[in-house]
Amino acid sequence: MPTKLLAPTLAGYRRSWLRRDLVAGVSAGAVVIPQAMAYATIANLPVQTGLYTCMVPMVVYALLGGSRAMSVSTTSTIATLSASTMVAAGVAAGSVESLMTLTFLVGVVLLAARLLRLGPLVENISEATTTGLKAGVGLTVAAGQLPKLLGVPADPAVTGFVRVLWSVLSRVGQAQVATVLLAAGSLAVLVTLAKLAPRVPAPLVVVAGGIMLVAFAGLDVEVIPPVPEGLPAPGLPDFAHAGGLLPGALAIATMAFLETVSVARGVRRPEEPRIDSNRELLATGTAGLAGAFFHTMPPAGGFSQTAVALRAGARTQLTGLVTAALALAVALFLAPLLGDLPEATLGALVVVATLGLVEPRAFVQLWRVDRPGFWIAVLTGMLGLSAGLLPAVAAGVLFTLYLVLRELNRPHVVEISREPLVLRVDTGLYTANVRANTDEIQRRAAGRRAVIVDCSRLSRVSLTVMHAFLDLAKDLAGDGVTIYFAALPPDALATVRLTPVGREYEAKGRILGSVEEAVSVV
């Protein structure tokens, strides 16, 4: 982990990296800026919100983050969860003030998690959960973009994958030919360039093409509302709906952290410092907190733009600073041109990005390797499609908690020796799992004269654990089996000695300093 707090990725910077970082920053910007603008439309927000998200959060992450090459703006998952959160909170569609509040709350949650050092804990959310959730996001968002691709009016009262899809299909007869052709062409260019020429910034190509068709060829399609020229004016969040936004902020913070850490670790080069989850909480949380005052969406690391930066040779977070400067230039000088950007082009960008979240191979792998994980992925995805994404996140966290507790609560008793019988408890014991382990010890000790329990792995012993072992000793004594406890760590032994029962057992020679000593006694 880098020890430097400010700009750790720029420590020891080499002049030979400069050209590659500059090229990578421009290349990533050509992808991330159009994508972020498209993601803003998912949440029914003006496209400039996505543009602003490429500024302040990127600069803050570049100064605090530990990943050398990751590009931090926002993602389709975060945009979709933001939309769901504002709908659930009863906030008017496109409310920038409420978005600022939501981004602020996400930043606060991430920073609180950093203060409590919860990074490793949050990472326990299973891959199966995120696989199912992303599939639900991808299909839901893709369905929501169909009105833009067909040029038909969307029904704002209809929500959910199935209802939105049915609503759109019932209006296919109203589709506009020019819009459909433009959407089909944009989709074809995006997919083709991604496969045949991955170094070419496909989002920039389709955005530029769509603007030129409208501006110079007079293509008659729906375009985005005018984009204000200049920088975002600082503002204050409106906390009127903070209570309703908080549950969604928790879900968004969780997904933003998981996506950020996943991308950061996935693109880390072997010679680079390891990614520290708590540093990522600090960087992402501060980026959200600062961005909230400049009308940004909740930030997170994105894989597609990061991949572009890596292919262009990115070495440090100078790449992110260059991308932020490019976004600044777009806001200052190119905003009027964006007014000719077709809605269908942005819809195509969103569809390609979000359908990439649906990974059939991940489901196949889960089926082959982790059958319970497969069903969790399926249930999470189906819940996202039917009940909404926020309930799906909550259910995914509960599913993960169930899996963790199920694994922790299994007995972890290892046989070290058969004659005499020496058993070692290979996990820490607490209220929920102590009975499973003591029952296993009793089962294995059945019919024996004595059993030695190696306690060297018990870093601490609670009163509940001591009472469970006392009950075990009584049960074994009733069966004619004597139990000896050996090799307790110093802290655990000190705790045992604080109780009369512990002192009594030690005085009787039932608590011994090592397994070898216990074997000699038996």
Image (spheres, grey):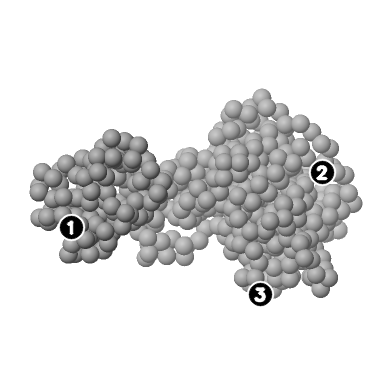
Amino acid type, callout 3? Leu
The CA distance from mark 2 to mark 3 is 34 Å
Quadrant of the image occupied by residue 398: top left
Which residue, as the protein is rendered here, is positioned at the far top? Answer: 240
**Where is residue 255 shown, x and y percent of the image?**
56, 48
Mark before the other along the chain sequence, 1 or 3? 3
Mark before the other along the chain sequence, 2 or 3? 3
Residue identified by numbered label 2: 226
The label on residue 522 is 1
Classify mark 3: helix, strand or loop. Answer: helix
- Answer whether labels 1 and 2 touch (C-beta < 8 Å): no
- Answer whether labels 1 and 3 touch (C-beta < 8 Å): no
**Where is residue 482 shown, x and y percent of the image?**
16, 50
Residue 377 relative to residue 50: left or right: left
Disc 1 crowd rating (10 Å Cα; few below 14, some 14-19, many 20+) is some
Question: Which residue occupies 70% across, 62% down?
Answer: 68
174, 205: nearer the viewer: 205
The CA distance from mark 1 to mark 3 is 73 Å
Residue identified by numbered label 3: 196
Classify mark 1: helix, strand or loop. Answer: loop
Residue 410 relative to residue 151: left or right: left
Disc 3 crowd rating (10 Å Cα; few below 14, some 14-19, many 20+) is few
317, 426: nearer the viewer: 426
Question: From the viewer's perspective, is residue 176 above or below residue 103?
Answer: below
Amino acid type, callout 1? Val
Mark before the other along the chain sequence, 1 or 2? 2
